[in-house]
Each structure stands twice: as C-alpha cells, then as structure tokens.
Image (cartoon, rainbow, N blue to C red):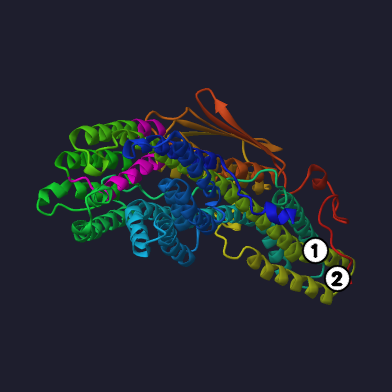
Amino acid sequence: MTRRWSALLPELRAADGVVVGLLVVMVVITALTVGTWAPGTSGTRTAALAVTGSVQTLPVLWRRERPIGALLVFAASVPIGWALVEGLPTWTWTVLVFGVVRRSRPAPGAVTLVASTPAALVLAGFVARPDDLATAVGFGVGLSVSLVPPLLGAALLGAVARLRAAREAARRRQEEQHRLTEALAAQRDRIAGDLRELVAVRVERVVTRTRALAAPADPGPRLSAIATEARAALAGMRRALSVLRDPAESPDPAPAPEAAPAPWWRPTRGGLVLAAGTALLVVLLGALAAVAAPHLEPGQARDVVALLDLDTARPLALLPVAVEALALGWWRRAPLAALVVATAASSVASWLGTTHLVTEAAWSVLVFGAGLGAGLVASGVTVLVCTVAIAVTTLTLGLPDALAGNRSGVVLSYLIVPAIWGLGVLQRRAATTAADRAARRADADAARAVTAQRLGLARELHDVLAHELSALVVTVHAARVAPEPATLATITEAGERIAAALPTLIEGLDPPASGHAAEHLELDAAALEALVAPVREAGLPVVVDVVGTAPADRPETDVIAARIVTEALTNTLRHAGPAPTRVTVRHAPDAVAVEVVDDGERPGHRPVREGSGLGLVGMRERAALVGGSVAAGPSGGGWRVAAHLPRREAGLLPEEETGGEGSPARGTITAPAAP
C-alpha cells in the first residue's frame, strides 16, 4: 500500500519550484491589486485570495506525469475557490492546459480541455447565482469566453512544443543511427584491410601451394612449405584475434552531418501556422465581439469584449494588429527581431486605440521564444527593454477602458514576463541536457555495437579459418610421414575449403589494396614517392627520405609502415592544412622506423573536425600486429607521429619465429585431434 501511494507522488525537478513559485507570486500580486478594481476589499479577503490561489497551484506539480488528472483536480477546485473568495487563477489554468496538450494523448486531452473548462466555470456560475439558472449559465459562458485567449494561447504553445519535441526525437534517432552506422562501417573497413593485407596473404599462399600439390616423387619440400605457410597464417590470426578482442580503445564514431541553417529572414513552418492561427482567432473573436457587444450592459464585461473587437471602420489602424500576428512566424528562427517588431506594433496599436487582447497575449510567445532560442544575456536585455517599452506606451499612449481603473494591476502584471522568459531558458537548458544525455547513450550503443562486431568477427575468423588451417597442419604432418595419394588429395580438398571460406569471411568489404599488392610491397624511395603523391596533389608539401634498404622476405612490416604514413599524412592535411611535412623511413635488418613531422597549422586553415576518430587507434592496432608501437604528440610548433615496427612475420612473437615445424609454437592456435 505504501508503494502504491508513493507512486502517486510527482517527480520533482528544479523547474517545478520555479514554475510554482512564479505562479504563487502572480496570485499574491493579483490579491494585492484587487482593491484597485473592487474598492472596499478587506485585508481578510486579500489574504484569502492569496492562500486559495496558492493552494490551487499545487496540481501544476503533476503536469508531466498526470496532466489530465492535474487539470481535472484543478477544474474541480474552481467552483470551490469561487465560493470562498470569488477568484479565478488564470495563470495556473494556462500552465495546466499547456501540460495537457504537451504531454497527454491527443483525443483524451482534447475531450478533457473542451469539457472541463466550461463545466468548471458554469459550476462557478451556479455558486455565484444559485437562485437564477439562466444568469448562472450566462455567467459561466461569459467567463469561458474571457478565458479563451490565454487558454488557447497556452494550447497553441503546447502543440508547438509537442511537435518540436517529436521532431527533435526523430532527428536524434536519425543521428544515433548515423553514428552507429558510421562506427560499424569504419570498424569493418579497417579490420577488412588488416585481414586482407596480413592474414589473407598467408592464407592465399597456403591455398596456392595446396593446389600445386600433386604426387611427385618427393612431396616433402612442398609439404614443408605448406606447413610453414599455414603456421604463419595461424600465428597471424592469433595476433589479429588479440587485437579484435582487446576493448582498450574504442574509436569515436563520426558525427552526423548537420544541415545548413536556414536564413534568419525565412519564417519557420510552425511559426507561420501559429501566426495564421492567431490571425484567424482575432477575426473570429472580433466577429463574435461585434455581435455580443450591443447586447451587453455597460460595465467591465463590455469593456473586456471591446478588447476583442476589430475597428473595421479604420482598416489601416488594424495594420499593427496584423504585424503582431505575423511576427509569430519568426518566434523560433529570429525571436529577438520578432519581439522588437511586435513591441513596436503593440505601441502603435496603443496609440491608435486598437489594442487587441489576443495579439497582446501572443506577445508572450515571443518572450518565451527569446528565452528558448537566443543567448542568455542578449535575450534578457531585449526582453527587459521591450517590456519596459510596451508598459510605458500602454500606460501613457492609450490604456483600454477595461483597464483604466487598474493601472497598478497593469504594471504588476508585467512581472509575469520574466517568468515566461525564464521558462524558455529552462526549456532550452533541459533540451541541451537531454541532447547531451542522448549523445552519450548513442556513443555507448555504438561502442557496444562495435565491440560486438569485433567479437563476432573474431569468432568467425577462429571458427571458419583457424579450424581448417589447424586441421590442415595435422594432415600435412601426417602426409610427411606417409605421403599417400589419398592424404595428398585430402590436403588439396582442405585448401579448396579454405579458399571458399576466405571470401565468405570478408564478403562485401572494400580494402584499399589487394593481398597480392601488399605481399610484394617494398617501402623504398620509389614506393614512398608514389605513396605521398596523392597528398602532394591535394596541396601538402612533403619531403621524403629513406635510409637503408628493405629486405624482400618480410613484406608485412612494410605494408603496415605504408598504412601509417598514409594515415599520418591524411591527418596532417585535415588538421594542419598545407603545412610543410617531412617523412623519414629507416630500414634496419630487424625493424623499420617511420617518422612523420609537420610544421604546424597554417594561418587561415580551418581544421576538418569531422572524421571517424580511427586514425591513431588504427595506427596502433596495425603496429600491434607485428609487436610494434606508435607515438604521437606535439613537436616544436607542429605534430609528430613516430612508429617502430619489428621486422617479423605478422602475428609472430619472437619466440614463435624460432619454433620448429614438428609442433606448433607456444601461443598459436592448435588443431583438434585428427580423427
């Protein structure tokens, strides 16, 4: 039971305290100014108004988890509050309407809004006029009409916020999918290149030698060669597996490409819909006010209806009202400019005496948009200046008759403007926090997917190729003892199975170089010049220097050195621009050293931030395949990448290079027992 009741409590956030606090401030301000339009109001009634209105703000705390329930509870409190103090907390009502439209399902939310508002106000009418049914209904309908502009404005804001949240969620999902796809594709391409260049080369050699195996008088030398190549391929796979299974470094996926921002002068689609809806509402309420005004007795109700009327006798005087409505089209793309234009139009409307209640309420949407879409300081200063300007012009140029006796209330009502602006700022910060949280979640998902891909490929590499190669080694050793034709045929068949399994393993991958090209690469001066030719054509001035001669019997180390040089030069071009760069390759009998040094970023160059994040990670993983290392960091005013690569078979450890052929070296993949 305790757990059930605790589930009904709201999940409070920092913004909840701000919203409720501001609503309470507005309630207190309203209570303190009630004496200006109702002379003779006692202090007791003022205190009762403040307390009752403050209590009625509590349902706002449930506006996110249970928006419909919160609105229904508030609607039920309206007749009670009217019976106690004859007060109507309009601002609390607008916040709850916003929550229903923003959070609830469309159909139940619409039914609740349409049914609860007039029902609550008609019940308040019965409380006010219990002895006259017609008057009670008319009282409730009149209150409903007077609440249409603020409640409809809140509903429009809720609809816009709902559409914006849905669009942002869709964009975030698309970006997450893009990041995941990019991470997997980059991972796949890098692994495919390594497998083709370093593992597939040896496997293809094994297949070639098994196909050439016939029944010569002495098949021993060919069998020994097959065993040697198979052992080297197994050792290479062992080191490749260790890299694939190592989660120490996870590359950052490439960021999703951002669409070019639209020009500020072009209104948003949602803004145009909001502007058109506001203009339509102005026309409809103007027509309704024109019909109802002659039937109303002079008084406050008639003065309020006059704020909804349109002075069709002076068409040009309606131009400021149209400008105020049109400014809503830029409430998201250029909120500060739209706010300034709407403020000027409102001032002109006050001077001409055509102030309209709907467009004045829509001005608060621009205030909210300023806090939501502009910088904190710029929007704060603009909102302050515009609020002061519109308050001064309203009080000095032309105050509507409905508000003429309540100047202090008009002034105090503008205190709600900072609250609306603050809600926009809080909404922007909440959206930024949600985006950061979604980005971290997307990065974690991409990292998990990349790890799963690596482990899956490692399992497939082990299950598909390692088993066949290990069984082949066992069969070769048996054939060397007794070279029967059937045994030799078994070896040939095993080679064909390996040949069929290899394309399946790396199907659909597109490495930058084929295995045969990598097999015969010698990183001499001519090869290095050809290697740097593409970046030279792209504008990078490169000077190359080769010291020593590369031995021809160990091509894998030169392949890895070439890949590191290519990656380092590409990174220099992206991050430093056409900076003078020196490439030095030093060959030794037991190792090759590579050094790429640039002079630093060129003035005026804009570094390319987009990338797979795989550069340094890929260089280190390639070097790890031969037990080498890569160091990178600042050097003078530029950047230096240095690699030391032992000259050994890809995947072989030093102790494996001296192992005998009769038994597998320590740490290699071993075959199951022969049947």
Q: Nearer the viewer, residue 552 or 350?
A: 350
* Residue under the point 16% across and 43% down: 353
**Quarter occupied by the N terminus:** bottom right
Compared with 66, 92 (above or below) is above
Residue 582 x, y percent position in the rendering: 50, 31
Residue pushed farthest bottom?
Answer: 486
Per the rendering, the mark at residue 223 is 1
Q: Is residue 56 left or right of residue 283?
A: right
Location of residue 128 by image quarter: bottom left
Amino acid at circle 1: Leu
Location of residue 401 by image quarter: top left
Q: Nearer the viewer, residue 249 or 374?
A: 374
How many marks do you count on the picture? Answer: 2
The reply to whether callout 2 and callout 1 are in contact (CB within 8 Å) is yes
* Residue 271 visible somewhere in the drawing: yes
* Residue under the point 71% across and 61% down: 461
